[in-house]
Image (cartoon, rainbow, N blue to C red):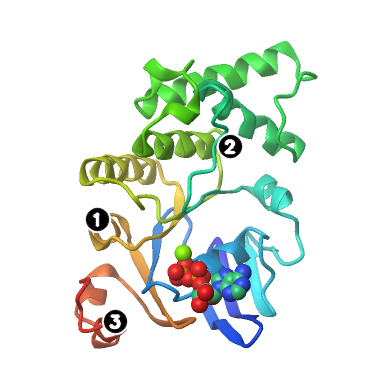
Amino acid sequence: MGILEVSNVNKSFGGLKALHEVNLSVEEGTVHAIIGPNGAGKSTLLNCFIGRLVPDTGSVMFDGTSLLGIKPHEINQAGVSRVFQTPEIFGDLTLLENVMIPAFAKRDGAFTLNAWSSVDEQEDVHDKAVSLLKDLGLHGKSHELAGTLSRGDKRRLELAMCLVQDPKLLLLDEPTAGMARADTNNTIDLMKDIASTGKTMVVIEHDMHVVFSLAERISVLAQGTVIVEDHPDKIKGNPKVQEAYLGGAHL
Ligand code: ADP
Ligand code: MG
């Protein structure tokens, strides 16, 4: 039994079947990638893991508990943190504040810089945030406003915002989208470092370089259906996958 077990999930938007009988099993301590052409249903699936969408039918189990009908902040409190396709940070706050907020949000189920926390608790979170910013190479910018960061640094900041919650499962939707190659490579190294700590990660990714350097298991989604789930070595040569990617143009 994986830490995340998705069984027979279906989701339609009006007449459009975005997900059809999707099954997925993510082993604890592994990096599992979900790849597939644009519009395949990857983000829709991820949104079903975090309570932004509710599947029409099927089940999503995390750590033995059903996630269906549970609110996003409760799923977060259960140990699921996520990075979206478009960075979601507080541009008018400092990097340090950005990293401290999710730690309190996990505890309280709401995004506030909580004035009622004890001084000790504030200090613990502060120290953890400082140490994470250091790990992610953002230490020198702790007191700058997050809105001024480059795209690559915003991603780093978002990763710090997830890691401060010490999640059991980290979900990443196209973490290198819109990045220049240098930033992409830095982000891959960073994700490898995080993976090496034994963190369970589900990565949705378009960039094959990223996928094949990180993932231990890959599910390929095409037109709302998982067409293959396998080890990366077996994915590249798979004719079904090549067909889904129009003759293997992206592989
Ligand atoms: P991917 O992330 O793989 O590119 P998405 O999950 O975003 O794909 O989209 C899958 C399909 O569902 C697409 O055809 C998209 O247009 C459609 N879709 C996604 N979200 C919605 C929505 N909220 N309402 C209507 N259609 C949607
Ligand atoms: Mg998407």
Q: Name the residue that disc number 2 marks.
A: 165
Q: CA distance from mark 3 to mark 1?
A: 18 Å
Q: Distance between the Cα atoms at labels 3 and 2?
A: 35 Å
Along the line of sight, which residue is nearer the eye, 19 or 146? Answer: 146
Neighbor class of circle 2 (other Cα within 10 Å; few <14, some 14-19, many 20+) is many
Residue 248 in the figure: left or right of residue 140:
left
Residue at the image position 21 percent from the left and 75 percent from the top = 236
Residue at 62% over, 34% down: 102
Tell me if residue 191 comes above or below residue 45 in the rendering: above
Dot 3 falls on a residue whose secondary structure is: helix
- At mark 1, the secondary structure is helix
Q: Amino acid at mark 2?
A: Gln
Closer to the chain start, of discs 2 and 1, is: 2
Q: What is the x, y in percent for residue 127?
A: 54, 17
Q: Is mark 3 within 8 Å of ligand 1?
A: no
Q: In this rendering, would 60 be left or right of 30?
A: right
Asked whether the viewer can see residue 201, the reply is: yes
**Residue matched to label 1:** 213
Mark 3 touching mark 2, by CB under 8 A? no
**In this orientation, which residue lies closer to the viewer: 213 or 94?**
94
Residue wearing tag 3: 241
User: Where's residue 69, x and y in %?
Assistant: 77, 65
Q: Residues within 10 Å of mark 1 (few under 14, many from 20)?
A: few
Compared to 166, does 211 lie above or below?
below
| Residue farthest right in this picture | 116
Q: CA distance from mark 2 to mark 1?
A: 25 Å
